[in-house]
Amino acid sequence: MNWRQRRRRGRRGRFPKPISIEHSIETEKFAPFPSKKLDPIIVDSAEIEALRLVDLEELSQNEAGERMGISRGTIWRLLQSARKKTAKAITEGRPLKIINEQENLK
């Protein structure tokens, strides 16, 4: 992944480090049944990978950061965002749409 193609938050500061994702995400969308015509909540593949490493593989945030090649603080931010989006989708009955940045760069 090219580091210039990732967005940074705010106007100043360094460009973010590239994030290493070990497992390819085969799912593009999760939708509740019956599917209503609601706008999907967009989840980044890096958020899904952080969620998988910490919650499913039960790694610490430091270990997950080392595996993804990013800091523990970035892991914390990705987890917070992924958990909030997942909870919002479940409580509101909205679909989740997963954006895979690595496929978009090819």
Image (cartoon, rainbow, N blue to C red):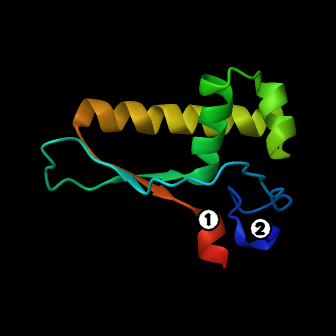
Q: Which mark is residue 101?
A: 1
| Whether residue 46 is visible | yes
Q: Which x, y percent locates residue 8? A: 71, 60
The image shows residue 24, relative to residue 80, as above or below, that is below
Q: Is residue 95 left or right of residue 99?
A: left
Residue type highlighted by circle 1: Glu
Q: Is residue 54 above or below residue 11?
A: above
Q: Earlier in the sequence, mark 2 or mark 1?
A: 2
Mark 2 and mark 1 residues within 8 Å of each other at the beta carbon = yes
- Horizontal placement of 81 versus 73: left or right? left
Q: Which residue is mark 2?
A: 1
Quarter placement of the N terminus? bottom right
Q: Is residue 71 visible?
A: no
Disc 1 packing (10 Å; few <14; some 14–19; many ≥20): some
Helix, strand or loop at mark 1: helix
- Element at badge 2? loop
Say which quarter of the image contains residue 32: top left
Number of labels in the image equals: 2
Crowding around mark 2 (Cα neighbors within 10 Å: few <14, some 14 to 19, many 20+) is: some
Q: Residue furthest bottom?
A: 106
Judge whether 60 appears above or below 22 on screen. above
Residue at the image position 86 percent from the left and 59 percent from the top: 14
* Residue at 73%, 48% in the rendered image: 22
Placement of the C terminus among the 4 image quadrants: bottom right
